[in-house]
């Protein structure tokens, strides 16, 4: 592939090719994602592990540990940090894909996400306590694009990102065999 097919480190020609195929056959556009997250009972090991396969390599072992106040050893990122990372990475990815398809280039792009979490809401039911506080994301970009174009892009990414849609989660219980 030639260098000019990449904008912001995204192979735009590959995105356009996929879009064309998915518009002709919509089922191609839907991908199932599945992860098995395991709890470890072994002391000295991260409490939470998950093998995350990738399309082209053997994958990656993700590990997480509860914060000290919630009984962990804090040797790995907490599940709450991964949660924030996934929200920020999802939004930033969509923002960059949309920008790249429009030919908007960035010298730098970063997203800062912050929120507070009330650990008491995890340990004790209190109707008046909200577990996760208001979340704020701050997008910092270096670009020659106008503020108007960037603000439109910001909103378009927000409208397309699943992070901003209500999440429907079904939880079922199965006994270990």
Image (cartoon, rainbow, N blue to C red):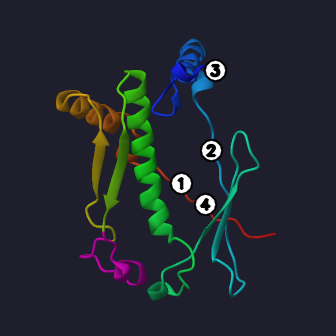
Please check the rendered image and state whether residue 128 is part of the magenta-colored stretch, yes or no: yes
Residue topped by disc 3 = 1
The reply to whether discs 1 and 2 touch (Cβ–Cβ < 8 Å) is no
Q: Which is closer to the viewer, label 2 or label 3?
A: 3
The reply to whether discs 4 and 1 touch (Cβ–Cβ < 8 Å) is yes
Q: Which is closer to the viewer, label 4 or label 2?
A: 2
Residue 18 in view: yes
Q: Where is residue 156 drawn, in percent x and y?
A: 31, 31
Residue topped by disc 1 = 170
Disc 2 crowd rating (10 Å Cα; few below 14, some 14-19, many 20+) is few
Which callout, 2 or 3, points at the residue further toward the start of the chain? 3
Front residue of 134/97: it is: 97
Gap in angstroms between the C-alphas marked 1 and 2: 15 Å
Residue 162 in view: no
Which callout, 1 or 3, points at the residue further toward the start of the chain? 3
Which callout, 4 or 3, points at the residue further toward the start of the chain? 3
Please check the rendered image and state whether residue 34 is part of the magenta-colored stretch, yes or no: no
Gap in angstroms between the C-alphas marked 1 and 3: 42 Å
Gap in angstroms between the C-alphas marked 4 and 3: 45 Å
The reply to whether discs 4 and 2 touch (Cβ–Cβ < 8 Å) is no
**Helix, strand or loop under label 2:** loop
- Relative height, residue 41 to residue 25 (above, below): below
Residue topped by disc 2 = 33
- Residue range of the region highlighted in magenta in the rendering: 116-130
Given the current orientation, which residue lies at the most extreme left position? 148
Q: Where is residue 162 drawn, in percent x and y?
A: 42, 42
Gap in angstroms between the C-alphas marked 4 and 1: 7 Å
Residue 65, quarter of the rendered image: bottom right
Q: Quadrant of the C terminus?
A: bottom right
Disc 4 crowd rating (10 Å Cα; few below 14, some 14-19, many 20+) is few
């Amino acid at each position: 592939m030639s260098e000019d097919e990449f904008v912001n480190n995204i192979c735009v020609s590959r995105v356009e090719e996929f879009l064309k195929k998915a518009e002709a056959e919509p089922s191609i556009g839907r991908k199932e994602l599945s992860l098995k997250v395991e709890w470890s009972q072994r002391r000295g090991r991260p409490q939470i592990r998950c093998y995350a396969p990738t399309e082209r390599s053997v994958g990656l072992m993700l590990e997480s540990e509860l914060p000290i106040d919630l009984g962990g050893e804090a040797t790995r990122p907490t599940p709450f940090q991964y949660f924030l990372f996934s929200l920020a990475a999802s939004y930033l990815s969509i923002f960059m894909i949309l920008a790249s398809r429009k030919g908007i280039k960035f010298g730098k792009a970063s997203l800062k996400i912050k929120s507070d979490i009330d650990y008491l809401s995890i340990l004790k039911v209190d109707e008046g306590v909200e577990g996760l506080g208001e979340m704020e994301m701050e997008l910092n970009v270096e670009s020659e694009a106008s503020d108007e174009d960037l603000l439109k892009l910001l909103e378009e990414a927000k409208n397309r990102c699943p992070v901003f849609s209500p999440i429907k989660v079904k939880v079922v219980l199965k006994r270990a065999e």
